[in-house]
Amino acid sequence: MSRAAIPILFATLLTAAARGDEPTETRSQALLGVLGDVLADGQGFRVDGLIEDGPATRLTRPDNPKAVGQLLEGDTVVRIDGKKFGSWRQWYDRLNVAYRAGKGTVRITVRTADGRESDWLVQPAVTDVDVPLEGVPLIAVPDLDPVPDPVFPKVRDLPAPKK
């Protein structure tokens, strides 16, 4: 296992543990390399931590690819590809659909701690994770073909997380 792949696995395990004992399915999933929680009532995903050198540390502006940034603790991702989400399942589904539509690039809308909102582009890493089931799946998402990622080149080679 490559050293770069360890943080994304760690984040995946922490995220899965935070959800409790919900029923899950294993699938290929676009991930931003963030720790946090989905907020109630469609308010977004509050960022509590970042994976070092993960996708969320390499954001670009949609109107100027030379303008770069990163998510910060306390930021909230409020929309993925213009769509709100209110559950873990919707978060994961929206990331996958946007990843597929954007051919490996996802547009996120971020609200900073001072309330300002801005759009950013991110190129998620893809790995197999357990995704929570919430009744009937919101969106049928086929397995994704990973886009090569210079920081996480071997993410797809990770063993499945232990249950």
Image (cartoon, helix red, strand yellow):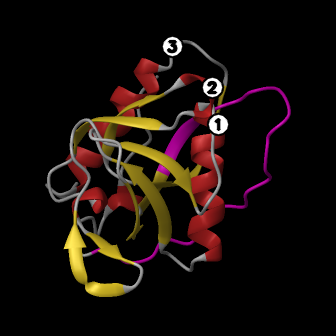
User: In the image, which residues are magenta?
Assistant: 128-149
Marks 1/2: CA–CA distance? 14 Å
- Tell me if 102 is positioned left or right of 117 in this view: right
Give the percent coordinates (x, y) of residue 80.
Answer: 55, 56
Q: Nearer the viewer, residue 5 or 103?
A: 103
Give the percent coordinates (x, y) of residue 74.
Answer: 26, 35
Which SS type dominates the magenta stretch?
A: loop
Q: Which mark is residue 89?
A: 1
The residue mark sitting in front, 1 or 2, is 2
Q: Return the residue at label 3.
A: 20
Amino acid carrying mark 2 in the image: Asp
Q: Find residue 57 and report its image quarter.
A: bottom left
Which residue corresponds to the image point at 63% horizontal and 25% vertical from the top-left? 41
The residue mark sitting in front, 3 or 1, is 1
Judge whether 5 appears above or below 14 on screen: below
Give the percent coordinates (x, y) of residue 5.
Answer: 24, 54
Q: Which mark is residue 65?
A: none
- Tell me if 154 is positioned left or right of 62 in this view: left
Q: Find residue 95 and report its image quarter.
A: bottom right
Ranked by sequence position, the earlier of labels 1 and 2 is 2
Ranked by sequence position, the earlier of labels 3 and 1 is 3
Q: Is residue 156 visible?
A: yes
Residue 131 included in the magenta stretch of the image: yes
Marks 3/1: CA–CA distance? 14 Å
Residue occupying the far right of the picture: 136
Amino acid carrying mark 1 in the image: Arg
Q: Return the residue at label 2.
A: 41
Say whether marks 2 and 3 touch (CB < 8 Å): no
Q: Find residue 103 and report its image quarter.
A: bottom right
Which residue corresponds to the image point at 40% horizontal and 52% vertical from the top-left? 110
Q: Residues within 10 Å of mark 1 (few under 14, many from 20)?
A: some
The residue mark sitting in front, 2 or 3, is 2
